[in-house]
Image (cartoon, rainbow, N blue to C red):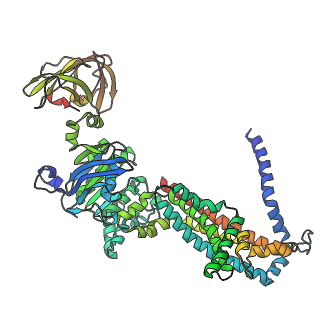
Amino acid sequence: MTQVSPAQSAEKPAWLDPATKPFIRVEGVTKNFNGFTAVDNVDLEIYQGELFAILGGSGCGKTTLLRILAGFERPTSGRILIDGADMTAVPPYERPVNMMFQSYAVFPHMTVEKNVAYGLKKEGAPKAEIQTRVKEMLELVQLDGFAERKPHQLSGGQRQRVALARALVKRPKVLLLDEPLAALDKKLREHTQFELMNIQDQIGVTFIVVTHDQDEAMTLATRIAVMQAGRFIQCGTPKEIYEYPVNRYVADFFGTINLFEGTVSRVEGEGMEVECGAIDAMVKAKSFETIQPNTRLTIAVRPEKISITKEPPDHNDKSVLKGVVWDLGYHGNLSIYRVKTDSGVIVQVSAQNRIRSAERVLEWDDVVYLSWDVQSSVVLTE
Amino acid sequence: MNRQRSTFLITILCFGYAFLYIPIVMVVIYSFNDSRIVSVWGGFSFRWYLQLLENRQIIEAALLSLRIAFVSATVATALGTLAGLALARMGRFRGRILFTGMIAAPLVMPEVITGLSLLLLFVSLQDLVGWPGGRGAATITIGHITFSMAYVAVIVQSRLMSLDESLQEAAMDLGGRPFRVTLDITLPIIAPALLSGWLLAFTLSLDDLVIASFVSGPGASTLPMWIFSKIRLGVTPDINALATVIITIVSLGVVIAGWLMFRQEKQRQRDVQ
């Protein structure tokens, strides 16, 4: 129970260390529903102690995959291994896996205590043990005073914690969470996010979270798998996915990004220049082995990587655009500028408001220069 | 404008309710009539109620009716619940609408036809296997089970449809086998629906005259049958008293069933939030 999660304690993350064996293996899992493929040949390796997020829009197959892991759906083909044991044909009530449902599914006719004790009773644990474990768990989720309450006397957040306690009290090898924060309001969501991470850290259970909210995935997860139309399109740490998206879909799904289509005009050693017709500019980016002149590709740049200045930048190793401030939004900690380039394309830029001032540094219709480093240009070939 | 509309509405409403309830109120009032002639008011008295208690035939018919109603409601609730559970559990399959419709069909089947077909069944069964060896309380009970089961199945099924499926999945996820989950989670949650189904089946059985007349044999007369045969000879004041007693019991049953359903609906809305 108190084992320290390797993902956090080891210097090298588990997924990069070839010596660590994956705890959960999903091998070529496919699920068909009457001719519709919800999950399409998915392979996945999750390590012990990870907080793994499966992210995707609605209907991408993420919930089906979670239900396959829980045992509510049988895969059409492929295998599920948990801790070395083949779980593909094991029914949900015999799997060392517990799930927290999106609707929480707290039993309405039982008290909080009975809800949490249900799983242990089905296990046949002795009464005294059930009592102490339920008590411990209610303390962990800060519901100590609520043992005798019925679910309808609880708030949404409290019900969610009952669901969490009920799933964790069985000490599962894996906890599955289906959209754990979707039903909570914004303030509570942020609070619960950190609480979940805290609890996961304390008990070291492997968490698999399914979500459609990229912010949630980014803050919570050690690694994220992005799913689209039943397939994984990218799997990596939040940083990897944010900074090195593999295609336009991933780039666009995570936060805001400016996309410029173009053709490679010159490759020179480590770097290259891409001619982007729409913004009428030469964008500098890093090249890689397979790149050839005249290849069509997309350059993606995050708004916060672009600096916005009134004077033209003096470094000539940067990509530079000229435009006017078309729109600006003040968000307290940062300002969002929408700049219209001379060619008429809108580019979004965000800048930290580092200096405390009631006056704006930049105003509408100011002529500005946008510039960014070579390594900030993300090259997307898909 | 509001006031105008409400006067009009209230008038209509009064007419409607008068049409529905005046006959019943008349029966109740005349049950306290001291006169032997039904249509002449001779002062207030409980004498017909006392006479009811002394009438062995009535007491026997009433006891038989209650016994049949109790047994048939209980069996119909058990079978109807199983049918409702099965239909709700099977998920979507080809012909599902047909099956659901077939469960509900006895609700709209004319009672005469149900009674006639049951009679035919019992008669031919007796010829083929020698059972039932004569018709009476047992055949009436079976007849009542067949039609009240449909009511229970429909009530249970509609309750199960609105039940969050993840409740049962969560219980299974926590280690409950499917049968235990039904006992631990599903049945307790739908218990109010079962109770209102039982009450409905009970009152239906208590009310029924047509089916009972078809499938009954000599010596087994339910209360409605006894009343019906009695008024062919003319209405006596003790029938009014009996009718009042029955009205009281039936309306109590309906009120409790309705209250249970109302409470359950409120509970569900509360759970949804």
Can the viewer see residue A59? yes
Q: Quadrant of the N terminus of chain A?
A: bottom left
Drawn side of residue B169 relative to residue A214, left or right: right
- B7 vs A4: above or below: above
Q: Quadrant of the C terminus of chain A?
A: top left
Q: Nearer the viewer, residue B139 or B119?
A: B119
Residue displayed at 36% across by 71% down: A122
Residue B229 at what x, y percent from top left? 81, 75
Q: Looking at the rendering, which quadrant does residue A129 occupy?
A: bottom left
Residue A51 at what x, y percent from top left? 24, 52
Can the viewer see residue A368? no
Q: Looking at the rendering, which quadrant does residue B54 occupy?
A: bottom right
Residue B261 at what x, y percent from top left? 59, 61
Drawn side of residue B241 relative to residue A45, left or right: right
Drawn side of residue A62 relative to residue B114, left or right: left
- A144 vs B140: above or below: above
Q: How many marks?
A: 0
Residue displayed at 78% across by 44% down: B8
Among all residues in the image, which is located at the extreme front? Answer: B128
- A382 vs A345: above or below: below
Residue B62 at what x, y percent from top left? 73, 78
Q: Nearer the viewer, residue A41 or B248?
A: A41
Q: Nearer the viewer, residue B220 or A343?
A: B220
